[in-house]
Image (cartoon, helix red, strand yellow):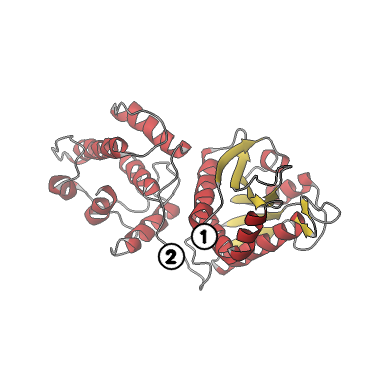
Amino acid sequence: MATIVIDAGHGGYDAGAVNGTRLEKNDNLRLAKAVGQRLQRCGVNVVYTRTTDEFIPLLERSRISNNRNTDLFVAFHRNSATNNTANGVETLIYTNASNKSLQAAEALQQALVNVGVQSNRGVKRANLSVLRETRAPALLLELGFINNAQDNELFDQKFDQYADAIARSLAQSVGVTCNPSGSTDNGNTPPDNNTPPTPPTTGNSTIRSIQNTLNARYGAGLKVDGIWGPQSQRALTRALQTELNLTYGAGLTIDGIFGPKTKSAIRNIAQGSRGNLVWILQSALYVKGFPTTIDSVFGPNTANQVRAFQAANNLTADGIAGPNTFAALFN
């Protein structure tokens, strides 16, 4: 069972940021418990660093995570600035964080942007204790500025939507498909999302990584700008055609056009598969707004995201990427 540590920032005599009678420590705990309850309904093992108004030292928060077989650590905070016009949502990772931390942070950030925020402040790197000292992939969420009236209004009005989006995103990052407002999902069915996923924001580091790999592995000649446009999409299609030729002797023209011949050359790939075709599948899922770890290994999270994509495109949600799934991804 996947384990996520939920860390409500501040607590006890440490109120965190303050705006009149509104204390950051209270907002943090309220959101942390709401997200934790949703994750538990989805079958995730949740460990809290605190569930009451108490002070927990920073190193103790990391120790709680490090003493367990933790898959992900998430700290909940509200931001603050001397200028009350500062606003928006950001997710922080450690300065030298792993790609898994980065991808989980980007997915979380995008999930919140999809719900609605004043401004998208993106994913940032920081040398903060809970990020540095925690061995598991670690994120720190700053959900709006407590000294900005509109951010507080969004926090209160969209609270349940934010909690749902956070729980869904965190669960997906540890390989669990989650419908947080409904019943427990054992991962064999796709999430029940009323709002279709939005492709990742531009300037995104994962997209830059995909572009770099397309350049290095397939000579794509792309500008590595983190913007997924027609040239990047065509390069990914050419990569697919190249691998189909190498793997299956498909004899395709490498033209970057996903036509009937390319579709007919597709063979089913499923959980347990490895290699460049899996990398291409994972990249295609990511740019469509179904993020999974892009590691060339078809694991449970990739299978979950394939099912979610299939359900969103009226395909049989079996988690097996075959001709129809690839056609929907590449057209």
Q: Residue at x 67, y 55 (%)?
A: 149
Label 1: how many Cα within 10 Å (few below 14, some 14–19, many 20+): many
276 with respect to 90 (left or right):
left
Q: Residues within 10 Å of mark 2 (few under 14, many from 20)?
A: some
Instruction: Name the residue beneath numbered marker 2.
Output: 193
Residues at marks 2 and 1 touching, judged by CB atoms closer than 8 Å: yes
Left or right: 216 as drawn, with respect to 26: left
Q: Amino acid at mark 2?
A: Asn
Residue 24 occupies quadrant: bottom right
Residue 43 shown left or right of residue 239 in the figure: right
Q: Residue at x 39, y 42 (%)?
A: 296
Outermost residue to the bottom:
183
Q: Which mark is residue 168?
A: 1
* Residue furthest right as drawn: 13
Amino acid residing under circle 1: Arg
Disc number for residue 323: none
Q: How far across and down, in percent of the image, does residue 191 sit? A: 44, 64
Instruction: Provide the secondary structure element on which disc 2 rests.
Output: loop
Residue positioned 67% across, 52% down in the render: 148
* 256 w.r.t. 326: above or below: above
Is residue 318 visible in this depiction of the protein? Answer: no
Sequence-earlier tag: 2 or 1: 1
In the displayed structure, 53 sits above or below 224; it is below
Q: Quadrant of the N terminus?
A: bottom right
